[in-house]
Image (spheres, helix red, strand yellow):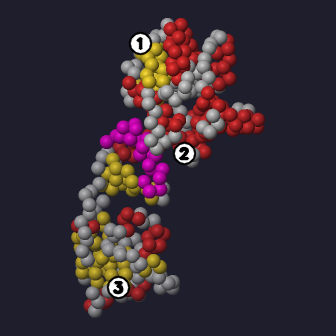
């Protein structure tokens, strides 16, 4: 950061006061241009006093300070999340290259525990990164591996003054409950639980990074343009959902049973009208985006002799169809057979099925109903559905 403009997020609490003091001490040697930013949320009756304290502290250290008053709008989220969003929006307005925040090891451990209790995935279990981006700015957390005890010791050694936020005693806030109740309980049995959670966060972050690299390589292998970092993170998050449907660069990615299925993004598919079929070797079905190919094989497929006295038709499923693929067993629903074969739900509705009257004769990937199956050396017709994608 030599020659860069770095602002410390200064709340006036012990952690941010220590960070400002440390970074003021290091600035001459590391060569960055230091300033501070204080965001006044107006949530406490003491908010204006905190702003005055920050102004006095920065004046004493000779550090320029910018103060921003914000309105916290809760919308559909909790107060903590709303205040964080307002704070980040204020940071966006500051004309600096990087913003340094005073999160430390205890904060990291509490964040990981909080996210795990909410059922978060890799991203949440990774906790807070030591370095991230906020728009075009860098977001830095230099104290992330320092425990609160070390920060308190530093503040005492340098006789630093700070303010106490009365809301820190409010255990209705989840983070305060974890800090004041859960943390001491864990420490009684696991004295180094903070370090363990911090280490786990680094492992999870490494796995998240590997997942991003893998997804980038996968998209590149498909000939698709690289997504932004934010889009990449969002894609991974959505792929964690069992019903994922992600659009990127003209392709729709869907997840089914831990597999990803890509398909070209198209306009709404045209309606399919039933087609009569006489066993021809090739039948194009453009409205289903594919074609039906057939070959004649003895002892396999639909018995050829049946075409002389029966009419066959290609239709889509309407629900309730059954197929008996084994003569020794009863028929089963098409839905269950498709599930067992691992056919994704979105493909089932647009698969061509061969019927004889109301009987389902053949389904792609499942085979021919035993009633219509060619046996012995009798000639038969084996259908094969070939979607263009």
Location of residue 310 (image quadrant): bottom left
Location of residue 138 (image quadrant): top left
- Is residue 214 or residue 65 the one in the foreground? 65
- Is residue 218 or residue 94 the one in the foreground? 94
Is 104 situated left or right of 266 in this image? right
x and y percentages locating residue 184 in the rendered image:
72, 34
Q: Which mark is residue 3?
A: 1
15 drawn magenta: no
x and y percentages locating residue 15 in the rendered image:
59, 22
Contact (Cβ within 8 Å) of mark 1 with mark 3: no
The image shows residue 335, relative to residue 257, as above or below, that is: below
| Viewer can see residue 299 | no
Residue at 37% x, 45% y is: 219
Q: Which span of residues is magenta-colored? A: 225-244
Q: Nearer the viewer, mark 1 or mark 2?
A: 2
Q: Which mark is residue 318?
A: none
Residue at 41% x, 65% y is: 345
Classify mark 2: residues with Cα within 10 Å, few (<14), some (14-19) or many (20+): some
Residue to which mark 2 is pinned: 120
Contact (Cβ within 8 Å) of mark 2 with mark 3: no
Element type where label 3 sits in the image: loop
The image shows residue 274, relative to residue 258, as above or below, that is: below
Contact (Cβ within 8 Å) of mark 1 with mark 2: no
């Amino acid at each position: 950061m030599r020659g860069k403009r770095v602002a410390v997020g200064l709340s006036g609490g012990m952690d941010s006061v220590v960070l400002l003091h440390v970074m003021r001490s290091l600035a001459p040697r590391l060569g960055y241009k230091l300033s501070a930013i204080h965001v006044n949320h107006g949530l406490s009756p003491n908010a204006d006093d905190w702003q005055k304290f920050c102004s006095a502290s920065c004046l004493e250290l000779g550090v320029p300070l910018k103060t921003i008053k914000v309105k916290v709008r809760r919308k559909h989220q909790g107060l903590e999340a709303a205040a964080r969003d307002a704070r980040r929006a204020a940071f966006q307005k500051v004309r600096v290259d990087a913003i340094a925040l005073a999160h430390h090891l205890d904060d990291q451990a509490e964040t990981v525990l909080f996210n795990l209790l909410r059922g978060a995935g890799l991203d949440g279990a990774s906790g807070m990164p030591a370095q991230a981006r906020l728009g075009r700015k860098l977001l830095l957390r230099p104290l992330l591996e320092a425990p609160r005890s070390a920060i308190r010791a530093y503040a005492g050694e340098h006789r630093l003054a700070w303010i106490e936020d009365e809301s820190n005693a409010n255990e209705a806030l989840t983070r305060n409950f974890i800090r004041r109740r859960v943390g001491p309980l864990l420490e009684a049995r696991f004295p180094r639980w903070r370090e363990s959670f911090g280490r786990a966060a680094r492992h999870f972050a490494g796995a998240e990074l590997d997942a991003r690299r893998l997804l980038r390589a996968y998209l590149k292998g498909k000939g698709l343009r690289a997504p932004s970092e934010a889009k990449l993170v969002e894609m991974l998050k959505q792929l964690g959902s069992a019903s994922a449907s992600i659009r990127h660069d003209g392709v729709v990615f869907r997840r089914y049973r831990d597999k990803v299925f890509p398909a070209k993004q198209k306009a709404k598919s045209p309606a399919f009208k039933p087609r009569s079929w006489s066993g021809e070797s090739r039948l194009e079905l453009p409205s289903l985006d594919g074609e039906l190919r057939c070959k004649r094989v003895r002892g396999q497929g639909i018995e050829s002799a049946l075409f002389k006295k029966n009419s066959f038709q290609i239709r889509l499923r309407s629900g309730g169809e059954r197929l008996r693929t084994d003569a020794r067993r009863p028929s089963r629903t098409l839905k269950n057979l498709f599930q067992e074969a691992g056919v994704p739900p979105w493909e089932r509705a647009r698969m061509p099925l061969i019927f004889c009257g109301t009987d389902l004769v053949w389904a792609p990937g499942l085979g021919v109903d035993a009633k219509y199956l060619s046996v012995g050396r009798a000639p038969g017709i084996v259908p094969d559905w070939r979607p263009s994608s």
